Amino acid sequence: MTQRAAIVEPPPLDSATAGAATNAGGRRLSRGRSATSLTAASGLGLGVALLWFSLLVLIPLTAVLVQASEGGWSAYWDSLRSPQTFAALRLTVGQAILVTVVNIFMGTTIAWVLVRDHFPGKRVLEVIIDIPLALPTIVGGLVLLSLYGPSSPLGVNWANTPIAVFLAFLFVTLPFIVRTVQPVLLELEPEVEEAAASLGATQFTIFRRVILPSLAPAIASGAALSFCRAISEYGSLVLLSGNLPYSTEVASVRILSYIEGDKLTEAAAVASILLIVALIVIVILDVISRRVARYA
Amino acid sequence: MSIRKLLRVRSVAALSAVAATVLLLTACVGGAATAPDGAGTTTLHLVGFAVPKEANNAIQKKFAQTPEGKDVVWEESYGASGDQSRAVVNGLPADYVNFSLEGDVTRLVKAGLVDETWNSGPTKGIVSDSAVVIVVQKGNPLGIRDWSDLVKPGVKIVTPNPASSGSARWNILAAYQQVIANGGTEAEAREYLTKFFNHVAALPGSGRDATNAFLEGSANVLISYENEAILARQSGEDFDYILPDATIKIENPGAVLKNANPKANTYLDFVLSKAGQEEFVKKGFRPVIADTPVGEVAGANDPAKPFPVPPKLFTINDLGGWDEVNAKFFDEATGLVPQIQQQTGRSQ
């Protein structure tokens, strides 16, 4: 159920407009643009896109919200008032924010290294970056457990602690920012940087005024993906986090517990809270990236 | 071109897009139509929890050798007991179900899929038994002999999560009720359970996950099911298990659905015959039919006498039945276990 949070992809403003336009048959979209921009072919494209989007995202999301609203506000209130659920939500969202911040720096750095630097093994690294996405997450959890668990060769034991949650989130979200920033970096024209340098800009100024504004939208969308992926994570934590209430239990385990107890309304309430948090974070990231881009 | 004309072109385009997609979807659905049964064979659908899969398959093989079971073809689905039960309610085809908890069959009764009299037979709807056991590292380095040893310093317990795994509840109930079986009061039982949770190092999602976490070294004690311990030892895992003097009898139900093929009833009868029960025994389950021949069971502590009866073996009925137990122990707001977890979780 929470996996759907990951489907809410940026840019959010466009998808919200698309949602509002479903019933109007796309009429609303034509208002803002010149009427000649929509040919028969793009009309077909729009129709397919809207139908596809509705079947896969909008209708299931609405179903979650309807299920959650069945108990009225009291279900939300009850699930939030349950201290165990609140602790789980706090841990999940907190760690997801932390992981997203780390990813913004590390992901951009890795993308930078992959694009701008030349070193032996670069191609291999390029391929390996995507592995966390391909690996079933429970296998990822097992790998992390053997590396950072009780029989760790590094001499640490982070299994069943909140650090385990942090590590698992990091593992599954690593590729997102790398993969969104990399193509934009490739497209950046070195002439612009050279021009800035010839006009006397320092390396830092060039990065701040030339490179960063171009990268900001890509970083923001990667960060949004990475945040959404993190708050919905379950598989890699199964063996690693220990699911200890008030300590390492994440929101998806709470949802699972509600379902096991045949409390679908509460489960949907927790899921919809995750959705709302995801939406807020996406909007915030979008606003920040627009600000940074305008700074150019 | 006028705007009106354009609008028309656009709506035609959108309509054709919808039509094309609908066609595409129907084509997909049409392609998935089920093939009719081959001549003279009956297809039975078994939906069950994962642990007794091998036992079920062995029973099916034996069943196929009987005149009634000769032409039966099986379609099976295995997974977590609660998930499987919910899947059947949501339309997963099933003739015979085999779950780890009575409540998962009750869910089907409430949905009108299983007759209310399903548990009125001689075994009360139960097809296999087991018991909650304490698993320790090889050679029992901590010298654990009973429940009371689990709350001593240095003990780290792993047990499946009673909130997200239904069958994990057997373990918690065993830990609680053993105090009472040994003459303690409810308050003492609660006190013990609080200490117990203070020693819990991990609550993995299922019994199998808990076994894996224990084998990875996350803890030095695993609360598990006798059949799970025996099966793991059969497949080469090296650990010891202890059957405490006071523990709970685990009862796994099996039921036939209302609109099932009549052969499913014949199959259930076969499961409850000595021939059927023998296969459960081989995989470490206790038989529900008293005079089932119990031969050597590999993996048991004493393969020749695999299932000693603990002096103070209690059942779910001694605790008042599942309805009462779920309300008293596991209710989100008022249950004993969430309360204790809150208490111990906060103090950690």
Image (tube, coloured by chain):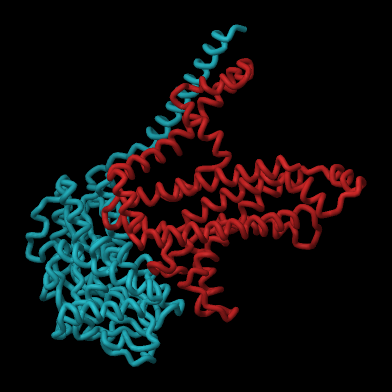
Chain colours: A red, B cyan
Q: Is residue B214 above or below residue B108?
A: below
In terms of depth relative to the viewer, which is nearer, B249 or B190? B190
**Quadrant of the rendering where the C terminus of chain B is positioned:** bottom left
Relative placement, left or right, of A9 versus A124 is left
> Is residue A243 visible to the viewer in this orientation of the structure?
yes
Residue A130 in percent (x, y) is at 62, 55
Identify the residue at image location x=22%, y=45%.
Answer: B40
In terms of image quadrants, where is residue A45? top right
In the figure, is residue A9 to the left or right of B142?
A: right
Q: Is A24 placed left or right of A264 in the picture?
A: right
**Quadrant, the N terminus of chain B:** top right
Relative depth, front residue between B144 and B328: B328
Q: Furthest residue to the top?
A: B2
Q: Position of residue B235 (x, y in %)?
A: 38, 76
Q: Which residue is found at the position 28% from the left and 66% from the top?
A: B52
Q: Residue shown at 45%/72% (left/top)?
A: A160
Residue B302 visible at all: no
Q: Could you say which quadrant of the image residue B175 lies in?
A: bottom left
Q: Quadrant of residue B249?
A: bottom left
Q: Position of residue B338 (x, y in %)?
A: 29, 67
Q: In the picture shown, does residue B281 fall above or below B268? A: below
- Of the pair A178 and B329, the residue shown nearer to us: B329
In this rendering, the answer to whether B269 lies above or below B12 is below
Q: Which residue is pictured at 50% across the width and 64% down the height?
A: A139
Image x and y of residue B189, in percent:
21, 79
- For the view shown, which residue lies furthest in the right direction? A198
